[in-house]
Image: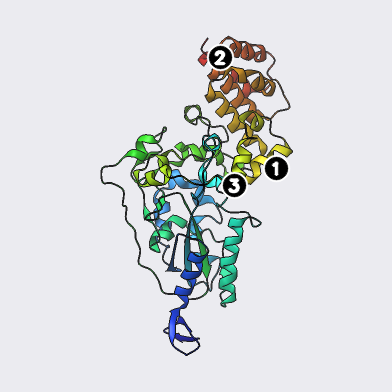
Amino acid sequence: MKIFNQIVYIHDYRGGIYMSFTEEIKNYALDLGYCGVGCISIDAVADYVEILKSRNETYDFLIRQPQGPMKGAIPKVFMPEAKSIIVLAWDYFQKDFPKTLTEKIERAYLSRSYHPLENSINGARVKLMEKFLVSKGCKVNTNINVPARWASAKAGVTTFGKNNFAYVNGVGSFIIIYTIVIDQKLDYDQPTMNCQCPQNCRACMAACPTAAIYEPFKLNPYKCLGFNAWMRQEKNNIPTVIPEGIREKMGTRVHGCDLCQEACPRNRKKLKSQFPKDQFLEKISRNFTLIDLLHITDDFYRKNVYPIMYNYIEDYKYFKRNAAVAIGNTGDSGMIPELAKILDNEDEDELVRIHVAWAIGHIGGKKAKQVLLNRLDEEQSIATKQEIISALNNCSV
């Protein structure tokens, strides 16, 4: 092995140069199944800091995070010897996703490839890449929160979509991006900081029920259905009560939203393609109901929730909150007795009972009104009582 201008080249047994270290990395990544790979210098994403600051009002929660993309855009803060960032794109839409699950959970989470568990096949793929780099003498860090979509466009792996997602040519936006920081210099790729969406297309904006995508490439996360499902938690310093105007727009979704991706013409081919069934998801789909999520137990969580929704949410009350909203949006009066059990249980978390009261009122009907009236006089929680009154005012009979 020799070094020319700090770029590493590998020799074959006759001493002839045939592959740079960068090419070897890319070949290995593609062999592992990644649909795109590129390399950039460690300073290539530093300009993301100013972009994030310019959107402070809507992305303040990211700016506050001690190890968020604000600092991740300057990886040397965490790894002073860092020289390069390797960007990998994984196409997670390679199997069929049961409709009974996609109505509730975003495909990225169903794929189990977003922040994959270490003992999973997707986690093993990342570990294999890391092990390969270490075997070549690299110091590796996969835990730096590099702004992935920005980095992938800088590395020529993806282009931008008006819906704020990253796209791989020929694959679409149903991808997961991984970044690996190493201490060696590589051959760097040319950026593809452009958009290949049809010029006048506004399909993603039209599909967003809350107008969270308020103009091309601009998203207000506080209006995003996915954000409201999994980011409204105490640890993020974001109010945990989902705004009433957002609740009815969430439909039956309890973890994420794919509406803007489903509406995109660039994803049409993928969505119309036939894929083999994912037998693990098929099994979970037979045992996953909103009522079970509302009354979540340790056993149900372990078997049917954790494998596909280990991202973001840890406390059961958030799953129950989201399930209550989803049940309310079904309009199924047969669900009212199950909701009433939660509303009448004063030991249940106030956050859950607030959203249950809304769900009962949103379903409406005489049965719903009677449940709310029966509870009103006995309710001790001020916040829940206010929600009951609001639900009664909005309850159709």
Q: Which residue is mark 3?
A: 311
Residue 54 pos. (x, y %): 39, 50
Taking depth in this image into account, of 47 and 369 the one nearest to the observer is: 369
Please tell me whether mark 2 sits on a helix, a strand or a loop. helix
- The amino acid sitting under disc 2 is Leu
| Image position, residue 330 (x, y; %) | 53, 24
Circle 1 crowding by C-alpha within 10 Å: few under 14, some 14–19, many from 20? few
Q: Tell me if 169 is positioned left or right of 67 in this view.
A: left
Name the element at disc 1.
helix
Q: Reply above or below: 370 against 308.
A: above
Q: Earlier in the sequence, mark 2 or mark 1?
A: 1
Against 390, residue 72 (above or below) is below
Who comes first in sequence, dot 3 or dot 2? 3
Do the residues bearing badges 2 and 1 touch, measured as CB atoms within 8 Å? no
Using the numbered discs, state the Cα–Cα distance from disc 3 to disc 2 in whole angstroms.
35 Å
Disc 1 target residue:
302
Q: Amino acid at mark 3?
A: Asn
Percent coordinates x, y for residue 351 in the rendering: 63, 30
Q: Residues within 10 Å of mark 2 (few under 14, many from 20)?
A: many
User: Do the residues bearing badges 3 and 1 touch, measured as CB atoms within 8 Å?
Assistant: no
Residue 355 can be seen in this image = yes
- The residue nearer to you, when weighing 180 against 171, is 171
Alpha carbon separation for disc pair 2 and 1:
36 Å
Residue appearing at x 41%, y 74% in the figure: 187
Q: Residues within 10 Å of mark 3 (few under 14, many from 20)?
A: some
